[in-house]
Amino acid sequence: MINYRLFTALTSELAQGHLITFPGSALLLENQLRDNPLIAELVAQAEQGKLADTRFGCGPFSRITLLPLSVWQDSLTDSLLTHIRPLFAAPVCEDVLLDCSDIDDTVLAKTLRFLFNQAHKLTDLGLKTVGERGVTLRRVNAFCAGTDASRLERVFAQQQAIANGMVAARRLADIPSEQCTPQFVVEEAQRLCATVPNLRCEVLDESAIVEQGLGLLHAVGKGSSRPPRLLAIHYDGASSGPVRSYVGKGITFDTGGLWLKEGAGMYTMKYDMCGAANVLGLMLSIAELKLPVRVMGVLALAENAIGPNAMQPGSVARACNGMTVEINNTDAEGRLVLSDAIAWASKRHEQTRYIIDLATLTGAVVKALGYELSGLMTQDNTLRSALTVAGEQSGDEVWSLPLDARLKKQTESAIADLCNTPTNNAAISASAAWLLHHFCPAYIPWAHLDVSGTALWREGGKSVASGRPIPLLMQHLLNDLAVEE
Ligand code: BES
Ligand code: MN
Ligand code: ZN
């Protein structure tokens, strides 16, 4: 975990590490750093709109980076992160001093999450031989105006907790699927939750899944030698009140089933459990912040494998709410496990404030919205606007796709109540959401987030887990708690 400290003046303690600031900053002016000829040169460079960076002759700092002010105020295109990300590929010191005296709130939140997320590296999995370990970032120091200090203290604590949840989720999602099986996810969750007060795990093994009638989850998982699990993580930060529920798609590997994917499309499918991993991460963040609320996270865990017991196209399975689904396409497995998990979650508690599911559900959402925006589908306008606003505030944004009864034909089946894929290629992402809506009773507000484009972060042609949409969901929860007060 990476720590932080806030300062309202440049003390000698702070005058070390990697300073990141901008030309007109009070930090430079008040401390006469501007008079230093080297810094004056950097200031001139940044004033021309360029990144100015030096590691030499900048004592007492180990590195000084100056960025144009416009970059600090641009929350839309992530330009601050684009500039500093390459510098943190190989940090030169353990401390960073971030100038927070004039920074946009969303840019700050994103930057802090980026810095606190440096606690996870792919090489931490121990699968790659690494030579001498380089320097790692250990502490984020911040310079801010005295009048901002108490507000920023809260922002830092929140973003640190969010990032810690993201790190746990990303680490789990990055583990290759032959190790990261449904049971492995359960054990990791149990291990992580055991150290945190107020978190409790409830596990349904394969026989409990069958006994409780989760026939869709079972249909997806039964073809694998690594059996399915349903994991509910309960957080009781309050002794009463409605439960807020999150449901995550946890396909530990998606081969497509008998409707087999081709190799290139299958390559990243160990990440098809990002929804579930992020539900776990969110629960850890909520518990770390000790929020006074009841929350349930449900992880629908299965491997969509091929084999003699794999579900077959044309078969029909029954969900725990009694509805039957014809499985015409075995590669549309996410909506099957989610349907059961949503129905199960809706029955688990007497009073549910909302259910939000998150899933790498369709490749089509990437075609529609790209890699920056998660797809939001809901019929509840209150939830829609709350999630949209929280997305803008956190910088973890969503965009709505339409969801209503005009999609009815997309899920009609001759043999069952529903079918899992339409025979056409129309409105693929929303058709999946239309199927899901049948499994949440109308009296519970429900929203679906398709995170196929956002749950992975793509850099240099490689994909790794991003931890999104944990920041969005935490911001939404914090706002929702403030509304309730
Ligand atoms: N896990 C995939 C969706 C996916 C694809 C996520 C690519 C991230 C990148 C999902 O289970 C799937 O296979 N969806 C199908 C739906 C289709 C059969 C209606 C798809 O997107 O092709
Ligand atoms: Mn699939
Ligand atoms: Zn899938």
Image: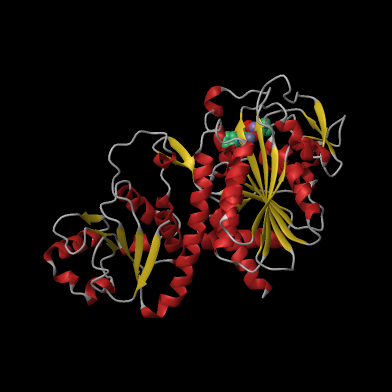
Determine whether 404 is above or below 412 in the image. Answer: below
Which residue is the extreme one toward the bottom? 147
Determine whether 307 is above or below 234 in the image. Answer: above
Where ligand 3 lies, by quadrant? Answer: top right
> Do we see residue 129 in this rendering?
yes
> Do we see residue 371 in this rendering?
no
User: Which quarter of the image is occupied by the C terminus?
Assistant: bottom right
Task: Give the residue at x 61% y 50%.
Answer: 279
Q: Which x, y percent locates residue 197?
A: 60, 61
Which one is nearer the viewer's eye here, 320 or 86? 320
Task: Give the residue at x 56% y 54%.
Answer: 470
Taking 271 as reference, is 485 left or right?
right
Determine whether 185 is above or below 268 in the image. Answer: below
Task: Give the residue at x 29% y 76%.
Answer: 9
User: Which quarter of the image is occupied by the N terminus?
Assistant: bottom left
- The colour style of the image is secondary structure
Q: Which x, y percent locates residue 122?
A: 42, 41
Which residue is the extreme one toward the top? 308
Q: Which x, y percent locates residue 106?
A: 46, 62
Task: Give the residue at x 60% y 32%.
Answer: 253
Q: Which x, y percent locates residue 32?
A: 18, 74
Q: Quadrant of residue 319?
A: top right
Q: Quadrant of residue 134?
A: top left
Taking 352 as reference, is 391 left or right?
left
Which one is nearer the viewer's eye here, 346 or 405? 346
Q: How many marks?
A: 0
Which residue is the extreme one toward the left? 37
Determine whether 337 is above or below 137 in the image. Answer: above
